[in-house]
Each structure stands twice: as C-alpha cells, then as structure tokens.
Amino acid sequence: MTDAKYESSIQAKPWKRWLKRGITAVFFILVGVLLFSLVRNMDWNAVVETLRGYKLPLILMGLGITAASFVVFSSYDLLGKIYTRHELPIKQVLPLAFVCYAFNLNLGAWVGGIALRYRLYTRMGLDVSTVTRVLSVSLVTNWLGYMILAGMLFSFRLLQLPQHWQIGAFGLQLIGFALLAVSIVYLAACRFSPRRVWHWRNHEIALPSLRLALMQATLGAANWSLMALLIYVLLPEGVAYPGILGILLVSSIAGVVTHIPAGLGVLEAVFIALLQHQVAKSEILAALIGYRALYFLIPLAVACLVYLFLERWGRKRS
C-alpha cells in the first residue's frame, strides 16, 4: 500500500486515525516512563564526582572515542541502505540511526532498536518490509563483529578468567572456536552459496555479497573495539587492552540475557569479577561510571533533541 492510499484509508475510517494516534501516544508514554526510570536509578552524584576526577584532555579523548563509535554504529544502517537500495539520503539515515542506537543502549533493543526504528523509518516513507531488512543487516553487522572479536580473544586465551569460574579457560576457548566457525560459515555462504534467496513466511531473506559481508565484519568489530577503548583509557595504566575488550564482550552477553536496560549493574558486576585482581574496585567503578556518562548519558541527551527534530520533520512530510 502506498503512502497516499494509506493516508486516504485513515481519513476514510476514523477508527484507524484514532488507533494510529493511540499507538503514538502509548509509544511516547513508554519512552517517557523508561527515561524517568533510567534517570531515577542513576547515581548522579557519583557521575559528577567521577567526571570531576578526570582531567579535561582525558574527557575530550573519551568524547572523541564516543563520537567515532557512534559514527561507526550509525553506519550499520548505511549498509542496510546498500543492501535494500532504498532512496533515503545519508543525511537522514545517519541521524535516525544515531537516535535509535542511543535509545537502544539506554532503554533496550525493543524501544530503540525496533520500535523507534520502525516508527521513524516508516514516517520517512519506507515500507515495513524494507525497515525489517535494514534492521536485520544492522543486527547481523553488530553480532558478526562481536563473534569475530570474541572468537579470536577466547580462542587465543587472551582473557584471563578467575580460577573459580566454572566455565574455565578451555571451555571459553571452545566457545571461541565455535564463534569463529559460525563467522566463517556466514562469510563463505555470502561468497560461494549458489542459492541467494530464501523465503520464510512472508519475508524474503537474501544473502549479501561477500564485499558487503566483509564491511559488516569490519564495522561491527570496529565499534566493539572503540567501546572497549573508551573503558581502557578511563582505567588506570597497566591493564591490557585485549583483556578489557574480552570482559566487555562477556558483560554484553550477560546484559542481553538479563534484559536490563543499559545493563545497569551487570556491566559493573562482570568487570569487578574479572578485573578486581588487577585493579581496585573503586577504580573500576569510577571508570565505568565515567564510561556510562560519556557513552550512554551524553549521547542520549543529544539523541532526545535529534529525535524531536526527526518527529517534527516527519509531521511536515506527512
């Protein structure tokens, strides 16, 4: 159904118009409630005190790393643009993707990664199936980069686990081999598979080219690496970067499993458990508070402003 037919059908049937307005109102209320919950549970005194303890050059470096990471993060949707060949210009895709990822990190994937992306993209003229494919490319990009990095770190035992961890170094190494195997199978399928398209229910799944898959692997790995780099520069000297990257990857899976927005408490628990034999707990917590402020809260504040602009632009377009 085209946009014109969709709008005319809404005008012809008042209940559809009220349903659309109701869904919009519920969405805004949900976002507001989640934002309030995030703000209420944040220890703002600790955030301020931690940032005061960092010197200006370090904060500027952290902001630079954060900006670079979000540029890479937002570029996931540019791969979706290449994959789907939709006609939205880059100047619209990048700010939209930035808003979605900032909300995703702070409020969870269902709000930022899915609901917000569908809302904004459809208001800009994309159909639902195209948005689904863009989202799919984004998810594969993120987790392909994750699997490659985690696979390499775990396979070469670059992450030192405490002795009491039941999984053990050998178990983690096996997981690393498995992650690398899945990544290699995906890349090989993109290059050699004679069948390029599958149908599942009403969705068409098409394998990307090897070139696009390699771009996915590069961007995904680069973003995870930048996130770990930010934590690394905030921690005291003497901590190895590969270890920080490995701990971040482990904590991210724990955050996904627990479904806690922004991984509140999960990130800190994993870092303390795996790093306390090298760094004092107070220094670990200080670094992670600084990380949350620079990578979560500041981008979220900017994203809220950009989101209002996108909503206003969408209303003018419709």
Image (tube, grey):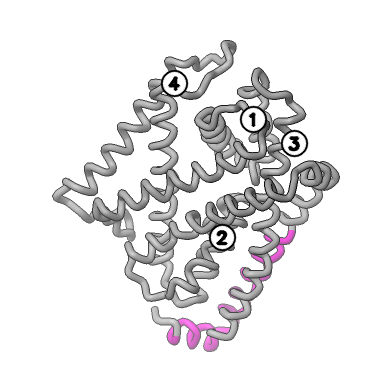
The mark closer to the camera, 2 or 4, is: 4
Q: Earlier in the sequence, mark 2 or mark 4?
A: 2
Evaluate if marks 1 and 4 touch, with contact meaning CB atoms under 8 Å apart: no
Using the image, tell me which numbered label, if any, was put on residue 157.
Answer: 4
Task: Indicate left or right for 145 with 12 as reference.
Answer: left
Question: How many angstroms separate mark 3 from mark 4 (CA)?
Answer: 27 Å
Residue 78 placed where, x, y %? 41, 63
Residue 142 placed where, x, y %? 44, 47
Task: Indicate left or right for 287 with 231 as reference.
Answer: right
Residue bearing the label numbered 2: 100
Residue bearing the label numbered 3: 286
Report the number of numbered marks: 4
Q: Earlier in the sequence, mark 1 or mark 3?
A: 1
The mark closer to the camera, 1 or 4, is: 1
Q: Which residues are magenta?
A: 4-32
Q: Secondary structure at mark 1?
A: loop
Q: Which amino acid type is marked by label 3?
A: Ala
Question: How many angstroms separate mark 2 from mark 4 (CA)?
Answer: 34 Å
> Where, by quadrant of the figure, is residue 82 drawn?
bottom left
